[in-house]
Amino acid sequence: MKRTILFFTILTLSSCSSVLLKMYGLKNPKHLDNLSISKIAYKYDIPEKNLFVLDSSYFSFLFSLDSIKYKKQIKNHSQPLQALYFDKSENFISFYINCYAGGFPNLKWNRNGILNSFVPKTQTPLDSVITFRQHLKYIKTLNNKSVSSDSLNSDYYVIVYWNRFMGRQSKRLIKYINRNLKLSDKSVQTSYVNTDNAYFDHAMKVK
């Protein structure tokens, strides 16, 4: 189940040629410093207080799962772009990933208007492979501090996994999720988690 960054990206768009990948606006993956992550997040309209990074140990955990029993779930949770919705009781209630979006030259996140209401109808089959608390375990602040569970007092929690190497597709996902969040009349705690370095570090380990 171990993959390189490039394979994750190609898997996302189903057997694309290098030319086609460029048409989707994808970039060469690389390691980013905190300043670079912050600058990109600003361009993508991500509030600084909601900006986090994914610890590279996430992939070690994910790929330690039974690859036969959870093959589909591992594939879904390793996608470059994701949005996960949880309710107050930390139940997993809606899931969005790039490989279910389809579309060209941009991924169609709001296909059939599924993001026109809150909570949106799930785009991807839900599962119980990774709990909300397990996601939090691998989410860090830019200065590598863990997320405190003391702040969990909202009606809903949304985790958005995004990165630089997916280019404008990341920006578009964030745009659609931000629009969807504005439809809620409840309190929502959102974490925008950059995954560039986690993918890069994992690729270096499996070369």
Image (cartoon, rainbow, N blue to C red):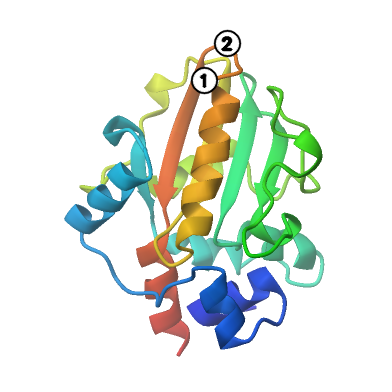
Which residue is drawn at the image coordinates 53% and 57% (left, top)?
Answer: 169
Q: Does residue 40 appear left or right of residue 23 in this picture? A: left
Which residue is drawn at the image coordinates 36% and 30% (left, top)?
Answer: 148
Residue nearest the observer in this picture, 165 or 194: 165
Q: Position of residue 135 (x, y in %)?
A: 52, 45
Disc assigned to residue 188: 1
Q: Up-down: is 8 above or below 176?
A: below
Q: Position of residue 140 (x, y in %)?
A: 34, 46
Q: Position of residue 58 (x, y in %)?
A: 48, 59
Q: Furthest residue to the bottom? A: 207
Q: Residue 179 appears in which quarter of the rendering?
A: top right
Q: Up-down: is 86 above or below 202?
A: above
Q: Does residue 7 appear left or right of residue 72 in this picture? A: left
Q: How far apart, in angstroms, are the residues tagged by discs 1 and 2?
A: 6 Å
Can residue 4 be seen by looking at this rendering? no
- Indicate the secondary structure of the residue bearing disc 1: strand
Mark 2 highlights which residue? 186
Which residue is drawn at the image coordinates 33% and 41% (left, top)?
Answer: 146
Give yes or no for contact between labels 1 and 2 (Cβ–Cβ under 8 Å). yes
